[in-house]
């Protein structure tokens, strides 16, 4: 493997994680504690939070204010929108999506969790597992987030009781058997006091596991991408039209799956023509091979007509090419889903129009019951639908590939994003 490829492998050092849990479980406080204890905030940010805390008459410094960006969030003391925060330690870079706990913001949680490697589910040690815990854990499994960390928070308010921790762990484990999550990890913490967040807790000598930050720094995410099925959705055609690059025609995009090598025989969709990869260019220079989630430009040996929305795949490993899709939809809009309604559909780099042909069932997220009688799909509801597109899409099931298995629906009249979907 050449030197440039090793530079690109550094991409795997970025871990995206999302927080989930009920209202007032301490998600924003936990993130504030992570940022503060890992020395990832500036002094002036800390001073501003300290002054706000004093002005509100709070004891100590309210670290939750570090993540609440909207004025309404700070005033009401709740999280409304998805807040993205970036921080880094010597071992890894992180992007945090702090998502709201309220039921009416389920769509925001779906948005924040859709690209995450890890989901942090917070549980208040005093309340145990509540409806929102089940709801958010199910969404994490629906979105195929590979790793789930269950942080049992506010252990300081239950006297750091091992019995309380073990009971919640046992109850969640029984519930999680219904979920499609392979890796579940439990950590007892106090976000307010910093127990087991960055530093090991002296108050819980009975806990022999790792701290939250240690887990986040060391969890293996290299295999979270699909490195088997080669998928390269074309995003942009690069034609410089200058003397230096007179014949240059490159296809730029982000690799959605598989490993592409120079000289590989590939098939172009939708035309079905086959050719070979002549060259792979990247920001750091030419590469011998490329893999997800790298953004590259591919040059082909033959001059075929490819444009945005087309896909480069392997000859003997191709996605499903269909106009009929079965999809799990999370509805985002205040206006309910219209049966026989027409919407724009966005899938990787391809755009089409579609019609909702059938609503199969609506999912009760609290019981996981499939309700086939109630076909009214309103905001934050999750349902299974069958839709037909105006032109074929090149897709895999969401379980197989989160990029080629996801769609977005847009209202043609208002241009609002009305739903996100996972192809079954």
Image: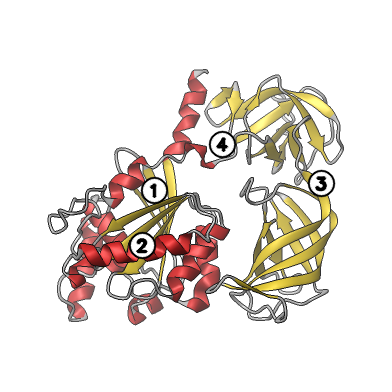
Residue located beneath label 2 in the image: 170
Is there CB contact under 8 Å for labels 2 and 3? no
Is there CB contact under 8 Å for labels 4 and 3? no
Is 63 situated left or right of 252 in this image? left
**Local crowd size for mark 3, using a 10 Å CA cut-off: few (<14), some (14–19), many (≥20):** some
Residue located beneath label 4 in the image: 294
x, y percentage for residue 48? 23, 67
Is 26 situated left or right of 205 in this image? right
Whole-Å distance between the Cαs marked 4 and 3?
A: 24 Å
**Local crowd size for mark 1, using a 10 Å CA cut-off: few (<14), some (14–19), many (≥20):** some
Whole-Å distance between the Cαs marked 1 and 3?
A: 35 Å
How many numbered dots are placed on residues in this image?
A: 4
The residue at 79%/76% (across/down) is 339
Nearest to viewer (mark 2 / mark 3): 2
Nearest to viewer (mark 1 / mark 3): 3
Seen as rendered, the residue at the extreme left is: 202
**Local crowd size for mark 2, using a 10 Å CA cut-off: few (<14), some (14–19), many (≥20):** few
Is 237 situated left or right of 25 in this image? right
Asked which secondary structure carries label 3, the reply is strand
Is any atom of residue 67 visible in this view?
no
Residue located beneath label 1 in the image: 94
Mark with earlier residue (1, 2) = 1
- Look at the picture and state if 208 lies above or below 195: above
Residue located beneath label 3 in the image: 321
Whole-Å distance between the Cαs marked 2 and 3?
A: 44 Å
Nearest to viewer (mark 2 / mark 4): 2
Tell me the number on the disc at residue 405: none
x, y percentage for residue 161? 19, 65
| Colour pattern | secondary structure
Asked which secondary structure carries label 2, the reply is helix
């Amino acid at each position: 493997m050449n030197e440039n490829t090793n530079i690109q492998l550094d991409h795997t050092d970025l871990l995206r994680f999302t927080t989930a849990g009920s209202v007032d479980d301490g998600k924003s406080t936990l993130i504030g504690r992570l940022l503060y204890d890992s020395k990832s905030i500036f002094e002036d940010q800390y001073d501003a939070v300290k002054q706000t805390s004093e002005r509100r008459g709070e004891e100590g410094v309210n670290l939750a204010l570090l993540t609440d960006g909207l004025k309404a969030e700070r005033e009401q003391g709740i999280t409304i929108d998805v807040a993205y925060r970036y921080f880094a330690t010597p071992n890894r870079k992180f992007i945090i999506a702090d998502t709201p706990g309220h039921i009416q913001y389920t769509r925001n949680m779906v948005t924040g969790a859709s690209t995450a490697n890890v989901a942090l589910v917070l549980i208040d040690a005093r309340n145990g597992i509540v409806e929102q815990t089940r709801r958010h854990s199910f969404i994490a499994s629906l979105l195929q987030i590979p790793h789930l960390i269950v942080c049992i928070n506010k252990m300081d308010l239950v006297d750091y009781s091992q019995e309380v921790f073990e009971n919640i762990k046992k109850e969640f484990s029984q519930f999680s058997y219904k979920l499609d999550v392979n890796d579940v990890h439990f950590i007892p913490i106090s976000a307010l006091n910093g127990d087991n967040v960055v530093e090991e807790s002296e108050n819980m000598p009975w806990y022999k596991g790792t701290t939250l930050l240690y887990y986040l720094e060391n969890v293996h995410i290299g295999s979270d991408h699909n490195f088997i099925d080669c998928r390269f959705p074309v995003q942009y055609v690069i034609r410089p039209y200058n003397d230096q690059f007179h014949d240059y025609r490159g296809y730029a995009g982000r690799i959605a799956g598989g490993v592409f090598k120079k000289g590989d025989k590939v098939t172009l969709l939708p035309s079905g023509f086959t050719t070979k990869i002549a060259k792979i260019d990247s920001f750091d220079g030419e590469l011998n091979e490329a893999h997800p989630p790298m953004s590259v430009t591919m040059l082909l040996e033959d001059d075929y007509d490819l444009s945005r929305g087309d896909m480069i795949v392997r000859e003997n490993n191709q996605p499903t090419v269909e106009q009929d899709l079965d999809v799990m939809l999370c509805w985002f809009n205040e206006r309910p889903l219209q049966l026989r309604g027409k919407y724009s559909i966005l899938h990787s780099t391809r755009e089409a129009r579609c019609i909702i042909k059938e609503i199969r069932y609506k999912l009760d997220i609290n019981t996981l019951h499939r309700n086939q009688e109630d076909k009214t799909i309103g905001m934050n509801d999750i349902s299974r639908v069958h839709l037909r597109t105006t032109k074929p899409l090149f897709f895999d099931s969401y379980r197989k590939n989160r990029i080629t298995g996801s769609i977005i629906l847009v209202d043609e009249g208002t241009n609002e994003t009305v739903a996100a979907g996972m192809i079954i």
